[in-house]
Image: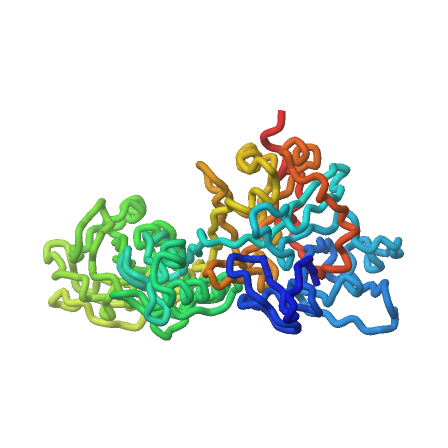
Amino acid sequence: MVRFAVEQEDNGKIRCDACPVLCYIKDGRTGACDRYANDQGELVRVDAFTLLQRTDNPSAMAVPFLINIDEPVEETPERTNSLDQTKTDATGPAAGKSWDGDIIGGDRHFVTAIGAGTTYPDYKPAPFIVSQRYDDVDMVTVVTEGIFSYCGAKVKIDTDRHVGPEQATVRVEGEAVGHVMTGEYGSQMLSLGGVNHLTGGSRKEGRITCDALLKLCNCEAVELTIDGGTTLTVQAGKAPIVNGVREQLMRVGCGSATIGMFARQWEPHVDEVVVVDDHITGVLSEHQAGKLLGMQPTGIRIKGRRSTPGRYFQVAEPGAGWGGTDIQDPLSILDEFKPAQARPGLRMLMVSTTGEQWAYFELDETLQPIPAPLPEALKASVAKIAENCEPSLCSVLFMGGAGGSLRAGVTENPVRLTRSVRQCLTHVSCGGAPAYVWPGGGITIMADVTQMPGNAFGYVPTPALVAPIEFTLRREDYQRLGGHMEHVQELQTIVTSAERYELTDQERWPLTVSHFAWGRS
């Protein structure tokens, strides 16, 4: 538990200066954000200060090296109890080595900003500026829980279902919290939050927007409604629920791409295949893939706008039916077959881009398609479409602009931090997760919330999100940056106030030399 020095009032209350609200807090109570509390006259950060622990061997044995070694160690798959009782990595007993007494594991730990506290007011240095060696290089990590008024979430929803028209307002409890963006390949995209919803509307809009962002960034479920569209339940890392139906598969490709992928498997067993898709419906006999396989014209006519051979746009309206269209009967997108090319007995498969919907027809004497049982050979091909579809998921990227007190907490000359990030001398992370830094001015970042420890985000009732952010660079570069060198402390000095979060994926480890190799001559 991190403690901060504050003055105590005569009535026993203390004033928290961790955000612009400036709460007066009674002893034993928390402030409006539930993140800071009064503990016998001291301001304390309620959530645990978190370190990442690199675990090269996930099955390594626990080593209780403090207090009573006979006392059992309670663990969860993701988070251990505290630093006084924790797992070791591959240098522990499970790797055949005895413990050497190293409590913090040297370069096997990374300091996150989760639970660290904020830099408000602006003149404060960052709560923790920590030095450690990694691969024989002196590194400094500057951590703070930033108060982000300029923040939001970009949400990717893997579904072909039409969720709503572009630019349509997205609502939570009736309040506008964002809008629908351009659709991407097999996914619908939402932009939620932002300063205009947090502070530019009514108090209720700001409060509900902040609450929705907090839940999404902490990987909780949020129900959204879209004007002129659907009701969605969105949760990072989980399948979306569209109008009460949980999605299963993400499309294998558009209709044309599906034709290209499976044409060779269809050609021996069928005369025509139509892959129904809201964006690009594919027709095998006309498609280049069918031509190269020697398939003959079938006389099929598709309702819609013909693009190139075998590719059709706007065969139906967007919806929750076949291939993201509004149809339930695939024959509704067909006109009469051309008598000069069609023939009785012609075999036709119609299928969606996920293989979840399919139908098989044969033409009768009047050239009308009549439903027939699906041949076994085609059953295998339909199943292979579904097999090649990835699971439908929701992805949530936190997006925020790092300015103000964040940069002042790192250096007395904040623009130098921006330039250092641009030159790739400073690596930016969020709760240890890699952050993508947008090009252009400022430090605008995006990070995948599922790669962060649980409950990494908080809020202040201004309203704004509180998000962890870390700046890591060589110690010599930090000094050259004009950093707060007098506030640098060694990693060993903070272990008693932190807990560990295991990280077994080495590609995500924040302290990787390649992160700091660019931009140096």
From where the camera sits, is residue 377 visible?
no
Residue 109 screen position, x and y as percent: 72, 51
- 317 vs 487, nearest the viewer: 487
Q: How is the image coloured?
A: rainbow
> What residue is drawn where x is 66% and y is 60%?
7
Kindly tell me whether residue 467 is visible in this rendering: yes
Q: The C terminus is located in which quarter? A: top right
In this rendering, is residue 122 above or below 482?
Answer: below
Q: Residue at x 64, y 59 (%)?
A: 115
Q: Residue at x 71, y 46 (%)?
A: 130
Q: Is residue 97 left or right of residue 79?
A: right
Nearer the observer, 189 or 18: 18
Q: Residue furthest top?
A: 521
In the figure, is residue 18 to the left or right of 285?
Answer: right
- Answer with left or right where residue 345 lies relative to residue 383: left
Residue 320 x %, y %: 29, 67
The quarter holding residue 233 reads bottom left
Q: Is residue 138 left or right of residue 26?
A: right
Residue 463: percent from left, percent from top? 45, 61
Q: Position of residue 328 (x, y in %)?
A: 25, 70
Q: Nearer the viewer, residue 328 or 301?
A: 328
